[in-house]
Amino acid sequence: MRVRGYAPATPCWAEYMTADPAGASAFYSGLFGWTPGEVFALDGRAVAGMLPGEPGRPSTWLCYVSALAAEDGVAAVLDAGGSVLVPAHDRGPRGRAALVADSAGAVFGLWQRGTSGGAEAAAEPATMCWTEVVTWDEATAVAFYGRAFNWSERKSEIAEGVDHIEWFVESRTVGGLSVMDERYPAGTPSHWRVTFEVEDCAATIARCVELGGAVLTGPLDLPVGHYAMLADPQGATFGVIALSDAILDTRV
């Protein structure tokens, strides 16, 4: 499905930051069928970006939240107790961006629309379908994102005994919150995680391993679909999910 734009305070874009763009291009084009470049494309539509990283720095996925004005988004982050890593700056005609961190140190970006509002495709395989904040401290995250973006939390169970927390604005779901526990290595920093939709989770896992990646979690059989957390050959982590028929039927 082609996407024309995003409401303010909505996750809208993901970029892969790496010192090995050739390796990243080979992996993600092989895994998702993306056409590589400064912007990864699917059937001519922008689905994710790629940024040059510093040699020796780990590769990572970076998520962006839409803002009417990047400077105003930065001010809101600072007011909520966050920090600015890269001030608002032009990205050519595509838009303006800033790199910030929440009050627990989780890094994310702000995106002000120019010619691009963010990902141009969604609700189909090989596109971003979910972003979530992963943190040790739920209360701190709720306070920060509530003040910065007016997000509220809504709790449920994604499966029996498995908590699921969604961010929402005026009844509109915009992302998720995952609270770390003993299953995570001690000292794991707060971070954002991106998940991509796939047609077949098992086949995607097999292809990831074939391309030199690794499986960190899963596959998990959840009511919303079959999910796995993967790592690419550069060590960057991301999720994949093959949505259940019940979820897919809601698109019709």
Image (cartoon, rainbow, N blue to C red):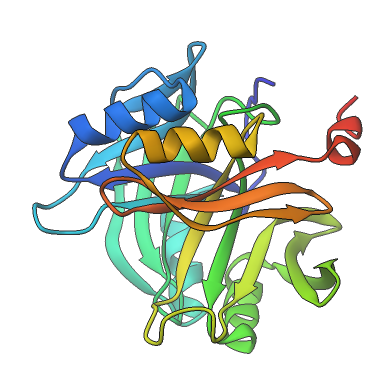
Q: Residue at x 63, y 28 (%)?
A: 125
- The relative height of residue 43 versus residue 149 in the rendered view (above or below) is above
Q: Is residue 252 left or right of residue 110?
A: right
Kindly give the residue lying farthest to the left in the view shown. Answer: 55
Quadrant (top left/top right/bottom left/bottom right) for the C terminus = top right
Residue 92 is at least partly visible in this image: no
Residue 19 is at least partly visible in this image: yes
Q: Is residue 155 left or right of residue 184?
A: right
| 66 vs 227, nearest the viewer | 227
Q: Residue at x 34, y 58 (%)?
A: 99
Image coordinates for residue 51, horizontal then vertical, percent: 26, 40
- The relative height of residue 209 versus residue 93 in the rendered view (above or below) is below
Quadrant (top left/top right/bottom left/bottom right) for the N terminus = top right
| 111 vs 30, nearest the viewer | 30
- The relative height of residue 52 versus residue 25 in the rendered view (above or below) is below
Tell me how many marks there are.
Answer: 0
Image coordinates for residue 246, horizontal then vertical, percent: 90, 39
Q: Residue at x 62, y 76 (%)?
A: 147
Image coordinates for residue 132, horizontal then vertical, percent: 59, 61
* Residue 5 lies in quadrant: top right
Image coordinates for residue 180, horizontal then vertical, percent: 56, 79
Q: Is residue 245 left or right of residue 218?
A: right
